């Protein structure tokens, strides 16, 4: 197996971040809170073990049997989420302490006071650590609860150019970024399917990143999609995570489950006298990841032979191609996902800064784009300030 230079750079940066983060946590939670050697040794062991877990869990999960591998993956992701908020809390509270100390030193210049004792420093460090643990634990607990709770249902109405009046009020239920894997299994899928069916949509679409694993590992959980019910069926397009998991194998498996896979092609939805075109493209980033052109985004191939005067809905995992491709091709509506809306604070702020269309409904001229925050989650099982969603789109003539 050839290791790509990009992977080495990524792993090097990741290692630097993980090691420096855990050293910082050790200093604030263990070294500063007590001088007893045993306590500090325990801190080195705990932080070293947790840091090694984050860096080595992917390799270990491939070597271990399924059940221990799943438990290890869950522990790793849980700790990554908790550590993120713990670091934020310690950094913020540490900044407050430093500011307070600076103000005290400024006052001491004008009116000298007794120096701060080691006992007081230790007390303040313990208080800071305790508050940080309580705050991060509370936020992380809420995030886990929100991630596993039923997604919110967002209903939007979109005027679709060229839509026949007979199809006015046609509804599409959008699922996206479910990420079936070690943390999302059949129970989650069954509940999601029941919630989607209750919306009584005319059509269901899944806009990529359905899975994080092979058909052999996750086929049973994904098979819950067989129970989705709508008048015009369920449609799927690939996301970037399908390429990590076997896009061709999953396309075949989903077809066996009764899901129509749209890989750079379109189908007509409705009756002969009243219909619109549902267009599906492969993931925008597939070719950039080294996959052949036949397995990447190709809107020209997907719309070949299509009557451009007809109403159209485009399913595309990433919103990246909306302005560059979909608008130019005259797509009336694009449904996308990928961004997760940032998934949890503060990454929702980063995503909003990086992506032109991070989440929600956007319009330009007569065309519209809806970017879902995703129905599941990826990585840490956290949803803070970016709740998961199922989208019900009503098309208006």
Image (tube, rainbow, N blue to C red):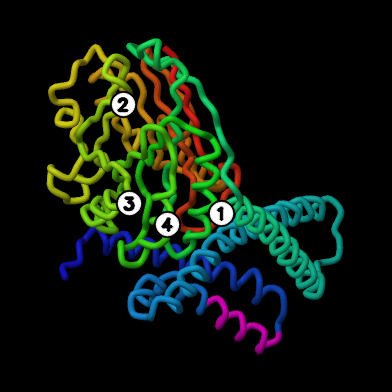
Rounded to the nearest angstrom, the CA distance separating label 4 from label 1 is 15 Å
Q: Quadrant of residue 273?
A: top left
Residue 389 in the image: above or below residue 20: above
Rounded to the nearest angstrom, the CA distance separating label 2 from label 1 is 36 Å
Q: Name the residue under label 3.
A: 257
In front here: 336 or 392? 392
State the mark number for residue 269.
2
Residue 59 in the image: above or below residue 152: below
Q: Total marks drawn?
A: 4
Quadrant assignment for the N terminus: bottom left
Q: What element carries label 2?
A: strand
Residue 324 in sight in this render: no
Rounded to the nearest angstrom, the CA distance separating label 3 from label 4 is 15 Å
Within 10 Å of disc 3 (Cα), the crowding (few <14, some 14-19, many 20+) is some
Q: Name the residue under label 4.
A: 180
Determine the main secondary structure of the stretch shown in magenta: helix
Q: N-terminal of the two: label 3 or label 1?
A: 3
Q: Is mark 3 on a helix, strand or loop?
A: loop
Q: Mark 1 points at which residue?
A: 382
Residue plotted at (32% across, 16% down): 274
Span colored in magenta? 36-47
Q: N-terminal of the two: label 3 or label 4?
A: 4
Within 10 Å of disc 4 (Cα), the crowding (few <14, some 14-19, many 20+) is many
Where in the figure is residue 215, as x and y percent of width and height? Answer: 30, 62
| In this rendering, the label closer to the viewer, 3 or 1 | 3
């Amino acid at each position: 197996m050839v290791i790509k230079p990009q992977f080495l750079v990524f792993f090097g940066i990741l290692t630097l971040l993980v090691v420096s983060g855990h050293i910082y946590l050790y200093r604030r939670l263990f070294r500063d809170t007590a001088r007893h050697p045993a306590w500090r040794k325990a801190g080195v062991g705990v932080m070293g073990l947790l840091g090694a877990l984050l860096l080595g869990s992917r390799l270990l999960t491939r070597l271990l049997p399924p059940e221990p591998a799943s438990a290890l993956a869950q522990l790793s992701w849980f700790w990554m989420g908790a550590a993120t908020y713990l670091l934020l809390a310690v950094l913020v509270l540490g900044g407050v302490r430093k500011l307070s100390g600076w103000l005290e030193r400024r006052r001491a210049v004008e009116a000298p006071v007794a120096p701060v004792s080691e006992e007081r420093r230790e007390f303040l460090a313990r208080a800071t650590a305790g508050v940080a643990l309580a705050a991060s634990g509370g936020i992380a607990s809420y995030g886990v609860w929100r991630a596993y709770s039923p997604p919110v249902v967002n209903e939007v109405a979109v005027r679709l150019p060229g839509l026949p009046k007979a199809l006015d009020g046609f509804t599409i239920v959008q699922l996206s970024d479910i990420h079936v894997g070690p943390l999302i299994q059949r129970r989650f899928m069954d509940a999601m399917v029941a919630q989607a069916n209750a919306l009584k949509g005319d059509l269901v679409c899944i806009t990529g990143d359905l899975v994080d694993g092979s058909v052999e590992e996750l086929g049973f959980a994904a098979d819950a999609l067989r129970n989705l019910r709508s008048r015009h069926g369920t449609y799927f397009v690939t996301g970037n995570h399908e390429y990590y998991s076997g896009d061709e194998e999953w396309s075949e498996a989903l077809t066996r489950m009764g899901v129509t896979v749209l890989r750079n092609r379109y189908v007509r939805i409705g009756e002969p006298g009243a219909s619109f075109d549902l267009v599906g493209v492969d993931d925008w980033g597939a070719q950039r990841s080294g996959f052949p052109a036949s397995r990447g985004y190709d809107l020209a191939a997907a719309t070949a032979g299509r009557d451009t005067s007809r109403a159209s809905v485009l399913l595309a995992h990433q919103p990246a191609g909306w302005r560059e491709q979909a608008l130019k091709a005259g797509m009336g509506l694009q449904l996308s996902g990928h961004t997760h809306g940032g998934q949890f604070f503060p990454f929702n702020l980063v995503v909003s800064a990086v992506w032109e269309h991070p989440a929600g409904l956007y319009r330009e001229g007569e065309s519209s784009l809806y970017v879902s925050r995703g129905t599941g989650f990826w990585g840490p099982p956290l949803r803070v300030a970016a709740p998961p969603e199922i989208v019900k789109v009503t098309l208006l003539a």
